[in-house]
Amino acid sequence: MGLLRALGAAARPGWSRLGAAAILGAGVAAGQAPFGFWWLSLLSLAVLIAEIAAEGRRARRLWLSWAAGVGYFALALFWIVDPFLVEPETFGWMAPFALLLMCAGMALFWLLAGWIAGVGRWPFARALGFALGLAVGDLVRSYVLTGFPWALLGHIWIDTPVAQAAAVVGPVGLSVLTAITAALPVMARDRRGRAVLSAVALAVLGCVWLAGSARLNQPVEPRDPPVRVRLVQPNAEQALKWQGDMWRVFLDRQLAWTAQPASEPLDLIIWPETAVPYLLEYSDDLFAEMAAVSGGVPIVTGVQRADGARYYNSLVALDGRGAVIAMHDKSHLVPFGEYIPFGDLLVPFGIRAFAAQEGFGYTPGAAIRVLDLGRAGRVLPLICYEAIFAQDLNRAVGQADWILQITNDGWFGDISGPYQHLAQTRLRAIEQGLPVLRVANTGVSGVIDAAGQLLHALPLNTEGALDVAVPPARPRPLYARTGDLPVAAFLVLALLVVAARRRFAD
């Protein structure tokens, strides 16, 4: 209640200051895909940290932090309205409320950073506290309530060599680097100190950039023998995917691209998430047809399956005769998209998830396990949203040769959502030292090497097929072995040092 009173209207900054904070927050989000203006992110973040550090009143600092968070997530997550517009006559009215609630709710993690800034008594300490608090917020929201590590601060580096640091420190480590680099110039007490700390920030960033460039240029032994794979992208628009006879149109597209002759023998053909329009239990005839047109090449496809009253979003591997030889059920589901929290209690009221074609949502499968696909190698399977959780890949059972992601990004619109999803998938390649083959219903499908570089791609909203060789893996990076524990320990230790300094100063 004390915090609520502190945030009362009497303690709130003027609307002009709140608006300016929101604009700065949006500037910080300008580094996210598809914009990639990392320099604008750093500049906006430095100015915002200076504003927060200069504010000595706790309540106003919290208001400014929250307003900046609203601006940040408004720009970074505006694609969140797109799933509601797939069936606008049913869900369209919810779109503005979803965006407002998402921005206001996610901004609470920035409010947390504003509260953590209070561990410092002086402006330079508040600047460091706020920077550390932003990284703490990224860490917490990566795990709490099943996690939502989308648009982390560190994601601004994905198109630069700095992203290679994720092999050591992971995505939250990149957020720490981003926040502290922006905070350093603000932590100085005079003009000379600002010049010195600005030079230090540039030197740190420059060293990480050069180290990343060196890693990108390291030679990697090619696979022997090579594994050749066909990626099939049907471009099934989400609003039409299950309507009337359109499902047959999209299925025929996939069969036609599968049947195309290859210049070199293929080891595997991959279809996207929910590419099969039948439940697994009724797909035997279709699987036989798929095997026939593939010329006996094994196929991996997305399909829904039922087990009693439970339904699963699944990936299955078919052998050359169309028999299922391996399967993965999506284990990390999208809240409100693929299931409703406490959904069993809400079924009588007709409240259901968006993506489920049967019932009122999906059931999560078991933990991710590596699948042995014979000549195609050992594969770590991911379905859509599972690719944003670095910690889930670290906990996967078995050692993979490469990562396979099938997805349906048709839910995410055409502007930012699909590209942000792709950017996070590229980061998983860096963290695991494994190449990723990504097959998306509407795009972007493509090949990502073990350093996170997009080598080949089918653009968004196009249909086609891509025959590619699986790139080689790299030695297993440090982050794949340690996860977020070292970064979490660093954040705790750093905050304890800042808090202790204040106590001794008092």
Image: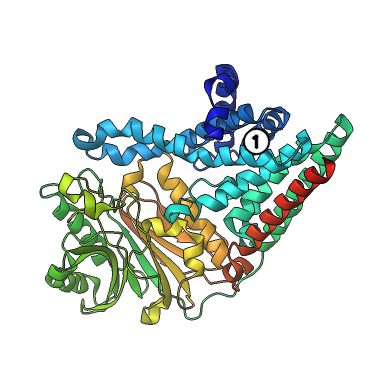
- Taking the spot 41% from the left edge, 44% from the top edge, the residue there is 417
Residue 284 pos. (x, y %): 14, 73
In the picture as drawn, the residue positioned furthest to the front comes out as 1
Q: Nearer the viewer, residue 394 or 424?
A: 394
Color encoding of the figure:
rainbow
From the image, which quarter does the C terminus lie in? top right
Name the spot of residue 499 as percent of width and height, x first. 74, 47
The residue tagged with tag 1: helix, strand or loop? helix
Please indicate whether residue 322 sits to the left or right of residue 388 in the image.
Answer: left
Q: Residue at x 46, y 47 (%)?
A: 420
- Residue at left offset 34%, top offset 51%: 335
Give the answer, above or below, for where 386 lies relative to 108: below
Q: Which residue is mark 1?
A: 45
Name the side, left or right, on which 367 lies relative to 31.
left
Q: Position of residue 11 (x, y in %)?
A: 59, 22
Name the quadrant containing residue 197: top right
Q: Quadrant of residue 304?
A: bottom left
Residue in the image at 42% along x and 73% along y: 379
Q: Is residue 469 visible?
A: no
